[in-house]
Amino acid sequence: RKEVEQDPGPFNVPEGATVAFNCTYSNSASQSFFWYRQDCRKEPKLLMSVYSSGNEDGRFTAQLNRASQYISLLIRDSKLSDSATYLCVVNVVSTLTFGKGTMLLVSP
Amino acid sequence: EADIYQTPRYLVIGTGKKITLECSQTMGHDKMYWYQQDPGMELHLIHYSYGVNSTEKGDLSSESTVSRIRTEHFPLTLESARPSHTSQYLCASSESSAGAKGETQYFGPGTRLLVL
């Protein structure tokens, strides 16, 4: 079983739509959680950290469920510029483990 | 924007050649990392360093080696390149502080390696 699992997509949504991605992790000792964004043929960049109480950054909302070992990312009012691959990332013991990513394609 | 640089950005080389991929950061970060990423696949950690003269192997077995003689510089070397080494190599760095700041990694633009 992979340590971090994501639906690879692609998720095809129109501009303005709300879209949600999920991620599950296998190691219950995981300490911290992140969403990174990776554009095509570019390096990953931190989108947001995920806190136990859930957190929001503009149109982006992240949730963590430790009991189910499940992380989610919600994007509201999708923009064309949101098209990218979203990587779920988990920190177990001071190194990061990356999921394969979920591809999002936002169309006009 | 992160101040972390990788050279070369693209490299095509023949089997058996020795290559060194360069990575430098000007943020004063103690921690540095090398990842390997194939198209459509997840990043795999191959080496990391927590400071000068500290290097560790990552989760993915790799025939490459690294060195950390200076804080800002973390080169990766392949003694004898093979077609199976064809991939993208991403360098990253992070602070030493505890919490989210210390865990946030900043990535360089990557080196795309093709071994013929």
Image (cartoon, helix red, strand yellow):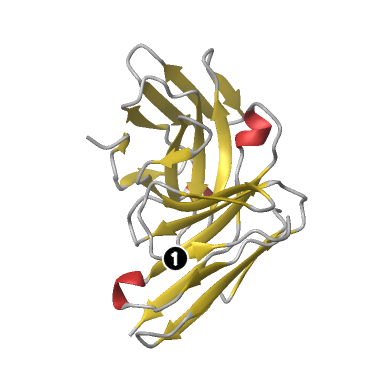
Q: Is residue A107 above or below residue A94?
A: below
Q: Is residue A92 above or below residue A68?
A: below
Which chain letter matches label 1? B
Which residue is depicted at the point 34% across and 28% down? A25
| SS for dot 1 | loop
Nearest the camera: A33 or B94?
B94
Residue position for label 1: B64
Which residue is depicted at the point 56% across and 58% down? B91
Tag 1: residue type? Ser
Left-right relation of B67 to A67: right
Dividing the picture into quarters, in which one does residue B70 lie?
Answer: bottom right
Q: Position of residue A81 (x, y in %)?
A: 53, 51
Q: Is residue B76 above or below residue B45?
A: below
Which residue is depicted at the point 57% across and 34% down? A48
Q: Position of residue B94 (x, y in %)?
A: 65, 44
The C terminus of chain B lies in quadrant: bottom left
Give the residue furthest to the left.
A1
Q: Is residue B115 visible?
A: yes
